[in-house]
Amino acid sequence: MPVGYDHIVIAVNDLNQTIADYTAIGFTVLPGGEHQHGISHNALVPFRDGSYFELIAFRNNGEGHGTHWPITLSKGEGFVDFALRTNDLWNELHGLRAAGLNYSNPKDGGRFRPDGQRIDWQTIRYGSGATVPSWMPFFCHDLTDRPLRVPDGEAVQHANGVAGIAGVTVVVADLDAASKDYATLTQGVGVAIESTGRDVARSRRFPIGSAWVELVQPSNRESELRTYLETRGELPYEVTLVSTHSHRELLPDRQTHGARLLVISDCRVSA
């Protein structure tokens, strides 16, 4: 079983500008370094719950990156993927496959931090998710000590009060098919969520550690949600963040570079 969210991947065109914009809206942003082979570089927004945002930009159009991320970025900045964390990747993989979920063999990954420290990890991906968007998350597991990849301490203190991820909303074309996979992943049937708007036909929510993932199927009417699905694919549409501040706010997408970020207050999160 996944223990929670590992990170959310946000692909952008200009990393330095993105760092400046995320800093301006109250996030603490740390340079992440350069991935092996120099195809991409990133910055991190780490949270108190152990998750983080990965802000990633590509060189040479991301050729050779091995994911759909550069192609999806060509359609506009924003979410391109999301990852869960597990305490035992191989045990997780055996369990997923035994349950009928087609996850790949572990693939090695790594980057060099600005201080020269090398960080290594392994990932497993669902089906063809390496080349096209998938409604299912990938898993990321550290081979080097996790704090080397995911900073804590002062790095998780944000001026806007954000403490972590409450949930991720994923847009899907077929709620029944996606819900079947998530029921297998989470070992539960989930809960149907009644929509308050006309843009959503049906939705279902599943637990991810102490957070949640909500699958939403757009209605047939023309809408921003349906356009997002048809343009970008079955990907995260919105990430809900919890904050120590007492407010509810949708952050400006110009400064979040296309990532729809909803910040809510949560009395369970202390300052």
Image (tube, rainbow, N blue to C red):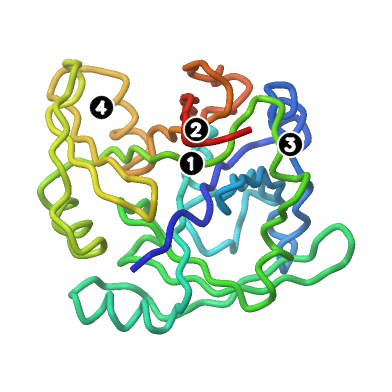
Q: CA distance from mark 1 to mark 3?
A: 15 Å
Query: What amino acid type is highlighted by mark number 1?
Result: Ile
The image quarter containing residue 182 is bottom left
Residue 28 marker: 3
Q: Position of residue 94 (x, y in %)?
A: 31, 83
Q: CA distance from mark 2 to mark 4?
A: 26 Å
Disc 3, SS = loop
Specify whether 91 is left or right of 206: right
Query: What amino acid type is highlighted by mark number 4?
Result: Arg
Q: CA distance from mark 1 to mark 2?
A: 6 Å
Q: Position of residue 197 (x, y in %)?
A: 20, 16
**Which residue in the structure is indicated by mark 4?**
226
Residue at point 37%, 51% (across, down): 133
Residue 165 marker: 1
Disc 4, SS = helix
User: Which comes sooner in the sequence, label 4 or label 3?
Assistant: 3
Disc 1, SS = strand
Depth check, mark 3 against mark 2: the one in front is: 2
**Which residue in the structure is indicated by mark 2?**
242
